[in-house]
Image (tube, coloured by chain):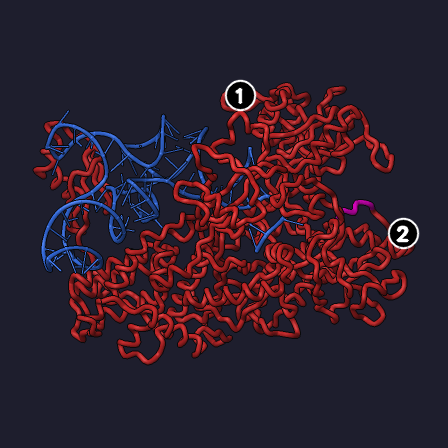
Chain colours: A red, B blue
Amino acid sequence: MEYNYQEIEKRWQIYWKKNNIFRTKEKKKLKYYILNMFPYPSGAGLHIGHCLGYITSDIYARYKRSQGYNVLNPIGFDSFGLPAEQYAIQTNKHPFETTSQNIKKYKNQINNLGISFDWSRKICTSDPNYYHWTQWMFIQIYNSWYDKDSEKAKSINLLIKEFQKNGNFYVNASTSFEKKFSSNIWNQLSVLEKESILLKYRLAYLSKSVVNWCPDLGTVLANDEIENGRSQRGGFPVQRKKMKQWHLRISAYANRLLKGLKYIECSDSLKNLQSNWIGELTGAFVVFDIVYPIYSKNNKIIKKIKSFIHHPEYIFGMSFVVLSSEHPLSKEIAIPSDQKKVLNFIQKTKNKNISGIFTGNYVFHPFITDQKIPIFISDYFSFDNQIESIIGIPCNDKKSEKFANEFGINFIQVNFCKKSQKIFFNSGFLNGLNSNKEAKKKVIAKLIEKKIGNKITTYKIRDAIFSRQRYWGEPIPIYFKNKIPYAIPIEKLPIILPKIENFHPSDGKSPLIRAKKWAWDEKNMKIVSSINIDDKKNIFPIETDTMPSWAGSSWYYLRYMDPHNTKFFLSKEKENFWKKVDLYIGGYEHGTGHLIYSRFWHKFLKDRGWINTEEPFKKVLNQGMILNYSYKILKVIDKNIFISYGLKNKEIFRSYSYQEIYVKTNLINKKNELDINLFKKTYPSFYDSYFYLENGVFICKNKLEKMSKSKYNVVNPDHISKKYGVDIFRLYEIFLGPVTQSKCWDDKKINGIKNFINKFWNLFHKNGVFQVSEIYPSSKEYYILHHTINSIHEKMKYFSLNTIISSFMIIVNQLTIMKCNKRKILEPLVKLIAPFAPHITEEIWNKLGKKKSIIYSKIPMSNIKYLNKKDKVKYPIMFNNKLKFVESFDKNISIKEIKNYIFNHYKTKLFLKKKTIKKFIIIPNKIINILF
RNA sequence: ACCCAGGUGGCGAAAUCGGUAGACGCGUUGGACUCAAAAUCCAAUGAUUUUAUAUCAUGCGGGUUCGAAUCCCGCCCUGGGUACCA
C-alpha cells in the first residue's frame, strides 16, 4: 500500500505553522545557530540548487533539536540587487513590487519543502528597518580609521585630536597619505584641506578606480554582463574607465582576515581560496631610475618607479619589469612612439591569456651600471595592492618564465646546482653564496644602504569599491557641502530610497539623479526637494550612488539574533545568548566575495565595541552546486543573422564576430536543435532574423553550468514534490551524492526513494491497516537497530548524508525480510528518519499514539549491550596482493598461531602451486599478505 | 591565464587511517504473480577471453610501497571563482 503524501504532508505543514513549532526563543538550553547563505529572491523562484542547502540545513537543524539543542534556524532575503533593476528597466515595474512578489513566491516554495525556518525572524535588506542599520554602519566605517599599532579600527575623532596635538608624526595608520605634518601645520589647514587628508585615513573613502564603462548603454556594467569585451545586452563595446567611487579600506584588515582563518572550521580548499584572495606577499620593494623619465599630467617629471620583488636574492636574474594596467603611471610610462598602442592595450578590458605590451621604456638595474631592463604593461601577474608592479625573474619563477617566453625576453641564470646545493653566480656581490636566506639578507641590506628599497609585506586584496551607479540599493547617507562629503546625522536614519519612475541609467550616473526630493537641509535636518539646492548655504545634494548588494549581506546574520530591535541593530543580551553562527551552509561560489566582506565587516564592528566575537562563523560547509545544461545560439554582432553552431569555423563565417545568446530550454529538442518558429514567436524582435542552417537544422551550443535564471537552466522543485511528495524529493536530493560535491541534475532515479518510502510505510501496515507488535525484539533485531543508530551518528559528524539514506534503506530492507513490526525497534527508527523525512514520520508517530510532535522527541543513542562484542577477527588472505580467501580467528590467538594455521591451510598449498613463500605480511586486525 | 574542486560499472555513487574496489540505489535482463498490464517479489548484472577459485579494471603517463581510488611528479578533461550576478 502506498501512503497518501498529498494529504499527510499538507496536514503536518499546517500543524507546524499553527503551533509555531519552529519559533525560537532565548531559552535556558544549549544553543545552536545554523544559517543558510542569504538567498536573492530571483523571479525564477526557488531552484533545486537552493533546495539542497535548505534541506541539508533543515536535516541538521532537526537533528540538533532532537539532541536537545535550542536551534536558531532563520531565513530572510538579500532583496536589493541588479536583476530586479534590470527587470525594472525592461518592464518599468518598480523593483519594490517585483521583489515583494518574488519573496512571497519563495516563502511559499520553502514552506512546501517542510523546512523548519523560524519565519518570525525574517529580514529583508531592502526593508528600511533593516537598511537603517546598514546605513548606520556605513557612517561608522566612514568615521573610523585603522590603527596599525593596536591592530584595530578607531573613531576618527581620536585621530583628529592626535593631529591637533602632534600632527601625524606618531600615527601608524592604514592610509594612502604618505607625507608627515606637525600639529601647527594641521591647525592652519582649511576645512577642505583637512577633510581631504582625513579622507585618506577614513575606512570609507572616495577615490578614483577603474570600472567597466559601456558608452552605448550609458552605464557601468558588472563583469557578469560582459562577454568577450562586449555588453551581453546589445553586444556594445566596453571600456575601462576611472570613476570617483566610495571604497572600503578592507586592505587594512588583510592580516587579520588571514590570521582569523585558523578559527574557522571549514575545508582546506576554502581556506586556501580565502588566503589566496588575500594574497600575502613578502619580499622587497626596489626603486628604479627610469631610463626615459616621464612627464605626468601636471607636468611634473617622474624619474623613479617602485617595483616589487618576491625573491630579492635573485635580483641579478631580473630581465623585465611589469606594471599592471591599473598602475598610476601605466598611461604615461611609454615612450611617445609607443604611447598609442599602449593606451589602446590599457583601455581594453582584461584579457585572460598571457598578454602584455612593451612600453619602449626601461629602468636601470640597481646594481649593474648602465644595464637597461625593459618595462612592460600586463595583467598576467597578480599584483599586490600597493605597488602594482613586479620584477620578472624568468630563471626562478614559472610565471615570469612563461611571460619571458611569450615576449622573447632573455633569461639570466643566477645559480647552479652543486651537490644538491644552489650556488649563486652571475650575481655580483652574491657570487659564491650557497644560501638563499643569506643572499636575501645581503640584497636587502644593500637596498637599504643605497636608499632604494627595503623588505615589505603586502597583500593582493584590494579595497572594495562600494559605490554603484544603480537605483536598487541602500542610499549612501552622505551629502556634499562644497564637494566635501558629510555624513547625515545618525539620528535621522534611515534615509529612505525615494521612488522614481525611470530606471534607465543616466550617462554613468545612478538613476537616483532623477529623484525630485533628494537634497539635505542641514539646518532643519531633513530631506528636501532637489530644486532648493543652493549649494553654499543650507541645502546640499545627497550622494546618488547606492551601496552594493554585499553591504546588506555582510551583517545580516547578526540581525537574526535580534530582528525586531528598533533601538539598536543588536542588543548585548541577545548577542551574548547566540554569540555567533555555529554552522554556515552555502555555495562554494561565495567562498571569496561574501565570506571576505562579512568577515571584514564583523571585525570592524568588533573593533568599535558593538559586538564581541572576532569571527562571525564557527563552521562553514559548502554545498556543491547542482548543474544543468544551458543552451546558447550564435548571433552575428551588429547583424540580424544567426548561424548554426557547427558553421562557426567555416571559411565564410570566420570573419564575423559573434555573440552567444542564452535561449530557453523549451525551444530546444533532444538533439540540440532550435525550433526556429517557436524562437521567433518567443522573441518577436528577432522575427525578421536570418538563420544559417547546417544539414537542414539549427544547432545550439550546450554547456553544463550552475543554475541561474539568466541561463534559463533552472529546475524548479515544485513539480517534483507535487508528483512524488516532499519527503521523497528531500531524500532524493540528498541521496544524489555528497553534499559538498557539485552534481548534474537528473530526476530519473527518484523511483529508488519512492520504493524505500513505500517499504518504510509498509513496515507499519498490513493490508493497509496500521499494525505494530508489542513483542520483545530478538537480539538480532536489536543488533540491526543499534548498529544503524551508531553509523548514523558517526556519518552525521561528517555530513555524509547520502550514505545515511543508504543505511536507512539497508535497515528497512532487513526488517522487511524479517517481517519485523515491533514497536521497540520501529519507534527508534522513526525518530532516526524524522529529520530527513519529517512529514511521513510525524504521521507514523501520531499513529503510534504519540500526542506531541516528533520534533520534541530525543534521538536514540546506541547501546553497547545490543552490539555484538566481536570476539573474532576476519582476515582477508592475499597471495601476491590478490585476495584468495577469508578466514576468521579468535581475537586472543597469537600471530604465530595464525601464521601456522595459514601455512598449513589446504588453500595455501593450492595457491602456492609448489612455489616457496618469500614473505609473510600480517597487519594485526587488518590483512594477511603472502608473497611468493 | 591564475586559484580551488572533481574525474570509480550503462547511470548516481560507496570505500573518512594506504589494506577484500563497486555498499546502497537507478537502469537492464530473466523468473514468479496476472487473462493481460501496472505494481510487487525473487535472481543475475565492471570488462575480457582460453570460463580459470584466470587476466584486466578507479581520466592518462610515470613514481613510492608487500599493498595506491587514496601519497608524490607530469599531463588531459569537466565545473566553480577571478573583485559590479547572487
Q: Nearer the viewer, residue A898 or A508?
A: A508
Q: Is residue A279 left or right of residue A115?
A: right
Residue A152 percent location from the top left of the image: 68, 56
Q: Quadrant of residue A66?
A: bottom left
Residue A290 appears in the picture as rendered: yes
- Magenta stretch encompasses residue A641: no
Screen quadrant of the C terminus of chain A: top left
- Residue A627 against residue A100 in the figure, above or below: above
Residue A443 percent location from the top left of the image: 68, 29
Q: Which residues are magenta?
A: A175-179
Residue at the limit of the structure toward the front, as seen here: A688
Residue at image coords 52%, 63%: A581
Could you say whether the residue bearing mark 2 is in a helix, strand or loop? helix
Per the picture, the main secondary structure of the magenta-coloured stretch is: loop
Tally the marks: 2
User: Which residue lies under the disc numbered 1?
Assistant: A417
Q: Nearer the viewer, residue A395 or B84?
A: B84
User: Which residue lies under the disc numbered 2?
Assistant: A185
- Residue A776 against residue B11 in the figure, above or below: below
Q: Nearer the viewer, residue A145 or A628?
A: A628
Label 1 – label 2 distance at C-alpha: 58 Å
